[in-house]
Every structure is written in structure tokens, then in C-alpha cells.
Image: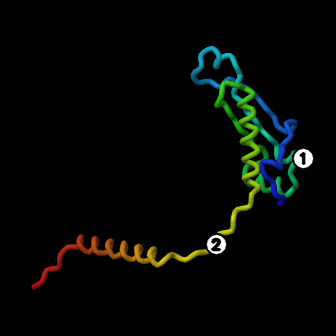
Amino acid sequence: MGKKNLETLAIPESEMKVKFSPSGGPGGQHANKASTRVELSWDIQTSSVLNALEKESLIQKYGPIIRLAVDETRSQSRNREIAQKRLLTKVVSALQSPKKRVATKPSRSAKARRVSSKKRRGELKKLRRTPKMEG
């Protein structure tokens, strides 16, 4: 996959479907009248900015359509910006390949802590046993 990051990847606005609705919550008349909640959806399969491998990777992770809803601010345009930024971040982070895990061994002190905690636990359990009758 090509290296995509927030600077190089740009999703055209023509590929995004945007719907607006009232956001609800406190705000009185403004919240009841203004449609500031933004619902953004982007169809991965019809996108022109990704190659087939990237599309397949995104579809496996999120499905064929990515949907976001934002109603954080009282401004419709600001909510739209936030939604677009989140979409871009979501896509870029999904296209990043995970780092390879480097195998490590536990340190000497970690081994000692493990053994001492096991010994303490064993001693505690030994104290709980019923005493043996000698006789």
C-alpha cells in the first residue's frame, strides 16, 4: 500500500454525502430550529482516491460505507469540518500498517517479582488449610 497520511490523502467533497438534522439537547429555540447536526457518509467502493488494495482493506475494517455523525458545536459548518477531519483521520489510521512486534524476554527483576508473588500466594493458601492432627 502506498504511504498515505493526513497531508497526502484528500477525499473530494463530491464523494461525501452530507445530511443535516437538528442536534437536540439544550439550546432552546436555536437547537429546535437550526439543523446543526451533520451526518457524513462516504462510499469506499466508488472512491477515486484509493487503489483496489486500500479499498479492500478499508471495507474489511469498516464495511462498504463509513458513516459519521457530529453535533458538538452550534455551527453547521464547524460540525461539517469536524466530520470531514474525523473521516480523513479514520481512513489514514486504518491504512497504516501495524508495527512488527519485537520479541523480548522478561528481565531478571520481573522474574524475581513473579516468583516471589507466587511464593507469597502459596504461603497464604497454606495458612488456610485445616491443620493436621498429630497423634
Assess disc 1: are there few (<14), some (14-19) or many (≥20) residues with their C-alpha within 10 Å of its C-alpha: few
Which element carries disc 2, helix, strand or loop? loop
| Residue 82 on image: x %, y % | 71, 36
Assess disc 2: are there few (<14), some (14-19) or many (≥20) residues with their C-alpha within 10 Å of its C-alpha: few
Which label's residue is closer to the chain start, 1 or 2?
1
Give the quadrant of residue 18: top right
What residue sits right under mark 2 in the picture?
Answer: 102
Which element carries disc 1, helix, strand or loop? loop
User: Label 1 vs label 2: CA separation?
Assistant: 36 Å
| Residue 24 on image: x %, y % | 62, 24
As drawn, which residue projects farthest toward the right? 48
Asked if the residue under mark 2 is in contact with the one under mark 1, i.e. CB atoms within 8 Å, the reply is no
Give the residue drawn at x 72%, y 42%: 86
What residue sits right under mark 1 in the picture?
Answer: 48
Query: Which of the two marks, 1 or 2, is nearer to us in this view?
Result: 2
Type of amino acid under label 1: Ser
Of 92 and 132, nearer the camera is 92
> Is 41 left or right of 130, judged from the image as shown?
right
Give the residue drawn at x 74%, y 57%: 96
Type of amino acid under label 2: Val
As drawn, which residue projects farthest toward the left? 135
Q: Is residue 122 above or below residue 50?
A: below
- The circle on residue 83 is none
Give the quadrant of residue 29: top right
Query: How many labels, in total?
Result: 2
Give the residue drawn at x 28%, y 74%: 123
As drawn, which residue projects farthest toward the bottom? 135
| Residue 11 on image: x %, y % | 84, 43
